[in-house]
Image (tube, rainbow, N blue to C red):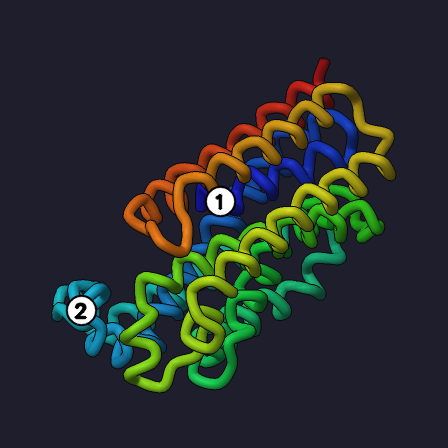
Amino acid sequence: TIFALPFAYIGAFLAVDGFPGGGDLLWITVAMVGARSLAMALNRLIDAGIDARNPRTAGREIPSGALRSWQVALFCLLSLAVFLVAVYQLAPIVRWLWPIPVAAFVIYPYLKRATWLSHFWLGAVDGLAPVGAWAAVTNELPLESWLLGAAVAVWVAGFDVLYALFDLEHDRAHGLHSVPARFGVTVTFWVARVCHVLTVVFLALAGALLAAGVLYWLGVAAVAGLLLYEHLLVSPKDTSRLDLAFFTMNGVISVTFFAFVLADVVV
């Protein structure tokens, strides 16, 4: 949530170049909570068998017996209900588009069984956050919103390929697909680097079309600096700080950029 929710807020604030209103922010938040809960629960439910065979994930709720599959399925339905209630409080366009992210949530867990492109599918799903929030407050989907979505998509894909290094040997042994399993460690790092350069490019293009202020551009510079630092933490020969690079730094990136955007649109 700390990765995607700030970018949903960024989409909403930039869409109106100011404060989008308390009601819209509330329902965007509820929609994000419902969607994120649904996506995570579906992933746990569909991947329960895979998780049970992986020592890193065997302690998750279903493999460990803490929850039964029917309980997680019920949680999925409740999360979907929360998501739909929120969607119907927002702009009419999102009442037609909501099946798209839900279908994407269902498809994602199956992709690792078939293609190493699953990382980019995950990125695209998270990239819907600023796009959906923009549409939710304006009932429109301009190019600027898609550029923000593209920035999030390649950012998430970039750090997800690094995250897949945790399961490199397991994925190869069990026929699961990922960039590390298919191309090796060195290529994985180059894919992540290219993705994160593109993140900055897409944020800059969005800012140019929006005629964004100085604080927005300082935010883009901060993102670039934090991404550089993230890549200095790990290398093909040293992945010992991968947890720090994946969880901590990416959480800092999303919150930091939101802070700059918020300051830019309200000052």
Q: Residue furthest top?
A: 267
230 with respect to 242 (left or right): right
Disc number at residue 55? 2
Residue neighbourhood size for the residue with mark 1, other residues' Cα within 10 Å, grouped as few (<14), some (14–19), many (≥20): some
Q: Report the side of 100 relative to 30 (left or right).
A: right
For label 2, the crowd category at 10 Å Cα-Cα, with few meaning under 14, some 14 to 19 and many 20 or more, is: few
Q: Nearer the viewer, residue 226 or 253?
A: 226
Residue 104 image point, x, y percent:
56, 71
Which structural element holds mark 1?
A: loop
**Badge 2 or badge 1: first in the primary sequence:** 1
Q: In the depicted view, which residue is nearer to us: 231 or 23?
A: 231
Q: State the mark number for residue 252.
A: none
Q: Residue at x 35, y 48 (%)?
A: 242
Q: Mark 2 to mark 1: distance in Å?
A: 26 Å
Residue at 38% in and 66% down: 76
Secondary element at tag 2: loop
Query: Could you say where residue 74 lies in the image, as x and y percent from the top left?
Result: 32, 69
Q: Name, please, the residue furthest toward the left.
A: 65
From this viewpoint, is residue 98 visible? yes
State left or right for residue 239 relative to residue 129.
left
Q: Which residue is drawn at 54% across and 55% down?
A: 192
Instruction: Tell me whether circle 2 and circle 1 mark residues in contact (CB < 8 Å).
Output: no
Residue type at tag 1: Phe
Viewer-proximal residue among 134 and 59: 59
Q: Can residue 61 be seen in this view?
A: no
Above or below, 211 relative to 204: above
- To which quarter of the image does residue 185 belong? bottom left
Residue 3's disc number: 1
Q: Check the image and report above or below for 231 versus 187.
A: above
Identified by mark 2, the residue type is Pro
Q: Which of labels 2 and 1 is toward the front?
A: 2
